Image (cartoon, rainbow, N blue to C red):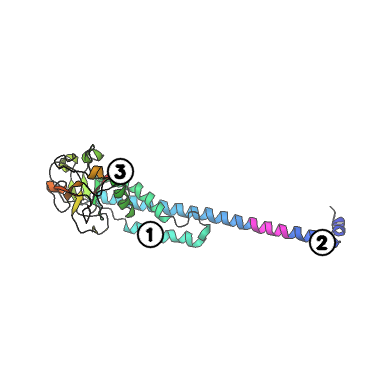
Amino acid sequence: MSNSLLRRWAGTPMNRQNLFCAAMTLVLVSALLSETARAVDDALLCRAAKLKITANYERCRIFEVVRAARRATLFIPDFSNCDERLSKAWAKPEKNYGSGCPTFGDQPTIQQEAISCTATISRKLAGRSRVFLSSVTYQGNLGGLTGADAKCQALADAQLLGGRWAAWLSDGSTDARDRLSSDGPFQLLDGRLVANSLADLTDGSISHEINRSELSDGSTQSCTNLVWTGTYPDGTRDTSILYPNCSNWSASSGAGGGYGNSTVGDAYWTSISEIACDVSCGGHLYCFEQP
């Protein structure tokens, strides 16, 4: 349309209104597209920043693992500096881009993934599997062996320990020693040696009692040293007592379960006798890291 024709067309009130509406529509569409572009840019920039921070965090953890492996003392990597740097760095893109930042508030998830990765590297370099005593206690209904393993895993995950975990526990058809896929050495979270190998673990005594929990200070929240095991010192299921496993760890009453004591390193660490499945203070679990 030529300029003269456009002027004549726009000269009428109705056409002027239509032209105004069209112009306003173009302005609104342009603003919307611009806002969308900015949101896309923010999302991309935030994601790029988070990827870089994650890479630096994993690099920091791997460095600490390698440095610990080179020490002649106990293999205990210190990740506190890495964790502190991650928290400070992670806050920046979320502050700068706000809700435009994809996966806003996902630091715990990313941190857990990085920890799982470096836990594998740490285990291979150290050649050891970690062990802890559950900080909490449970009645004899553990949800079977699978439920007990899940309890160990949940406690480890809550403390960002990484790795896979299984309970030292036997039922009516499965021996505790056969549930461990690691041949050790086994160590507490503070690095103290429990046993050099699976054979050493099941020879009737351990080098150090399993008395430290998954918590950073190793404490427990309980009034008992009792630990559910249902297991002989040689790692096999206990058949010497009438009720060795709380009906395959599915009963909270009407039966009993075999237990050990977390304060000793002799055969009683895993096998003393049986006790009611609904014992008032409950029982702990020994949790072993799996390869």
User: Sequence order check: which comes first, mark 3 or mark 1?
Assistant: 1
Q: How many numbered discs?
A: 3
Q: Specify few, some or many for label 1: CA neighbours under 10 Å numbering under 14, 14-19, or 20 or more.
A: some
Mark 3 is on which residue type? Thr
Q: Residue at left 50%, top 62%?
A: 96
Left/right of residue 213 with respect to residue 241 in the rendered view: right
Q: Residue at left 53%, top 54%?
A: 43
The CA distance from mark 3 to mark 1 is 36 Å
Camera-nearest residue between 106 and 65: 106
Mark 2 is on which residue type? Arg
User: Sequence order check: which comes first, mark 2 or mark 3?
Assistant: 2
Mark 1 is on which residue type? Arg
The residue labelled by disc 1 is 85
Camera-nearest residue between 218 and 101: 218
The residues colored magenta run 24-33
Q: Which circle marks residue 146 in the picture?
A: 3
Magenta part, dominant SS: helix
